[in-house]
Image (cartoon, grey):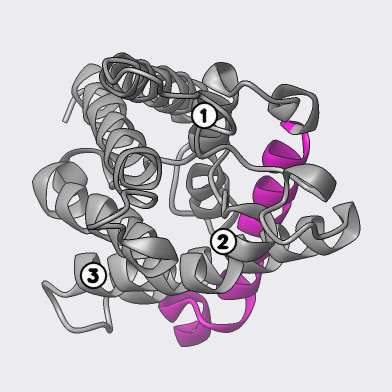
Amino acid sequence: MTLKTKVAAEFFGTFWLVLGGCGAAVLAAGFPELGIGFAGVALAFGLTVLTMVYTVGYISGGHFNPAVSFGLWAAGKFETREMLPYIVAQVLGGILGAWVLYLIATGKAGFEVGAFASNGYGELSPGRYSLGAVFLTEVVMTMMFIFIILGSIDERAPAGFAGISIGLGLTLIHLISIPVSNTSVNPARSTAAALFADTAAMSQLWVFWVAPIIGGVLGGIIWKLFFDAKRNAS
């Protein structure tokens, strides 16, 4: 596949992740009769990744997340020269997804933008968790997400099931961490939501770049050192 095709796949995959995941939170989670709650939002994020892994994952690798790109790079499974184009495509795709969601959401009379599914700590955390707790959560959850991804795509894993385990892994991560940080583990998703939020989310955005990238790199290094098939075979 050409880099142009890979970047396009990352753009549309991240667009769907933000539109689907954040859309579930903004449009459906608080609906009086049919509210899907935290569990529904968690499942929505998992389903966006699951569907896109099978739709375009064979084209680009199905990152849809700068932290995933860093994690795969740290594990030696992603080329440095493709990092910047991937991240730019992911961020732009996420922003387009958030913009489309904003246009839909504001089409309802009386809609208040509020947090717009953004991430945060302190007053911007759903459970009012501290910066330290949010930072640790994002590092550990992203680390485990990379761990799940690398295990799922490993040559020793059952073929054809990677999208399911990765999607369900992201669902579980959301079930754990929505109350803490509203779950980022994805700087592109956090950037997109923060741009439209009517809060101080932009001032806290640095956390949701630094912590997921640290977690992603840690996950990639741990996998490479202890579990990589080729390394262990040598």
Residue drawn at 69 percent across, 25 percent down: 199
The residue wearing badge 2 is 178
**Can residue 213 be seen at all in this image of the molecule?**
yes
Are the residues flagged by discs 3 and 1 in contact, CB closer than 8 Å? no
> Disc 2 marks which amino acid?
Ile
Give the extent of the magenta segment: 205-234
The residue wearing badge 1 is 193
Figure quadrant of residue 86: top left
Question: Mark 3 vs mark 2: which is more N-terminal?
Answer: 3
| Separation of marks 3 and 1 at Cα, in angstroms | 27 Å
Q: Position of residue 210 (x, y in %)?
A: 75, 41
The residue wearing badge 3 is 162
Q: Residues within 10 Å of mark 1 (few under 14, many from 20)?
A: many
Of residues 171 and 213, which is closer to you in this image? 171
| Quadrant showing the N terminus | top left
Are the residues flagged by discs 1 and 2 in contact, CB closer than 8 Å? no
Nearer the camera: disc 3 or disc 2: 2
Question: Mark 3 vs mark 1: which is more N-terminal?
Answer: 3
| Separation of marks 3 and 2 at Cα, in angstroms | 24 Å
Question: Mark 1 vs mark 2: which is more N-terminal?
Answer: 2
